[in-house]
Image (cartoon, rainbow, N blue to C red):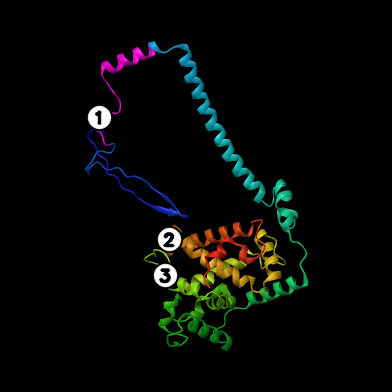
Amino acid sequence: MASATLRRRLHHGDVDGRKYERYDASDSDTLSEPLLGSSEPLLGNSSTDNHSRDGYNEERTLEDIWEEERKRQQVHWTLIFSQLIAQWAQWIAKVVFGSGSLFGRFLFLPSFGQTGAGGRLLPPPLSMLQEERLRNIKRRIEIPFDGSRMEHQDALRQLWRLAYPQRELPPLKSELWKEMGWQGTDPSTDFRGGGYISLENLIFFAKTYPESFQRLLHKQDGTRAEWEYPFAVAGINISFMLAQMLDLQSGKPSTVAGIRFMAFLEEDEMAFDNLYCIAFQMMDAQWLAKRASYMEFNDVLKSTRAQLERELALDDVSSIRDLPAFNLLYK
C-alpha cells in the first residue's frame, strides 16, 4: 500500500435507529494526514528485529509457554461460550414467542388460548359484548367508499375542516386535495381496498389526537425526505394493514395480535381506531429512523406491522394505553 493511498468516505445507513458505516478505497485521491498518525512501518523487516525475537524465544521458560497456552485456551472457550449464550437467547426468544412451539404452549399461550390444527391459536370464548363489537368492526370493514353517497362526501368535507380549520373548503374534486396526501384531484379514487373505515380512522385521529394528526400531516417531526409519503394514502394503507394483522376478516381472530385485540375490545369500543392512531405514529417514527423515501414506504409499513405485533405480544399489556408506542401520541 506504499504507492496507493486511501480516501476515507463515511456512509450512513440508519436502520431502526442504528447507524452503519463503510469505507471506500480510492487510489487517485490523497490524504491530508496519515491514517494511523505515524509513518513508521507496522512490521519490522531488519535482521535486528529477527535477532531480538530469537533472544526473546530463548529467554522464555516452559512455565511461560504453558501460561500463554492456558490464556489462549481461556480466551478461546470464553468466545465459544459467549456465542452459545447468544444462540440460546435467540432460541429461547423463539420458543417463548413462537406460537407453535412446545414450550410456547406452556409459557406463552395460556393468556391467549390453546393451539389447534396447523399450529393456529384457538381463541378463548368471546363475551356477548366482544361478539357485538367484533360484528360492528367487520361491518365497518366491509363498507366500500362510495363517492356518490352524501354521507361519504360529508365525511371527506369533515376531514378537510379538521385538517385545515382556517382554510376554505374546496370542491370534492380539486388540486388542493393533493396537499393532504391524496394522489389525485379526486380522493374517492384512492380508497380501493381501504374502504370507508379508513376515512373514519383519519377523522377519529384528527379529533382524538389533534396535535399528533397535525404534526404528521405537516411532517413537523425529524429530518424529512425530499420525497415524502403521502399522508392520506398512507392512512388508507395503515387501515388495510391493521385489518389483516388483527385477522378481522376471519370468523374469529386466531393470531396472537388478533386475540390480544379482542381483549382490548372488551374495554374499548374504539380499540381499532385507537390502535390505528398508534400505528400511524409508529409508522412515521420508523420512517424517520430509517431515513426512508417514497419508494421505501412498503418496507416501512412491514416494519411497523412487525413492531406492533411485538408490542401486542408483551405479557404486561392489558389495554391500548399499555402499549409502549402509545406514549408517542400527542393529544
The answer to which quarter of the image holds residue 258 is: bottom right
Residue placed under numbered mark 3 in the picture: 220
Q: Is residue 57 left or right of residue 82?
A: left
In the foreground, 163 or 234: 163
Q: How far is disc 1 from disc 3 in space, using C-alphas?
A: 52 Å
Residue placed under numbered mark 1 in the picture: 40
Q: Is residue 320 left or right of residue 222?
A: right
In the foreground, 177 or 288: 288
Disc 1, SS? loop
| Magenta part of the chain | 37-57
- Mark 2 Cα within 10 Å, few/some/many (few <14, many 20+)? many
Q: How far is disc 2 from disc 3 in space, using C-alphas?
A: 16 Å
- Mark 1 Cα within 10 Å, few/some/many (few <14, many 20+)? few
In percent of width and height, residue 164 lies at 45, 82
Disc 3, SS? loop
Residue placed under numbered mark 2 in the picture: 292
Amino acid marked by disc 1: Glu
Amino acid marked by disc 3: Gln
Q: Which badge, 2 or 3, comes first in the chain's sequence? A: 3
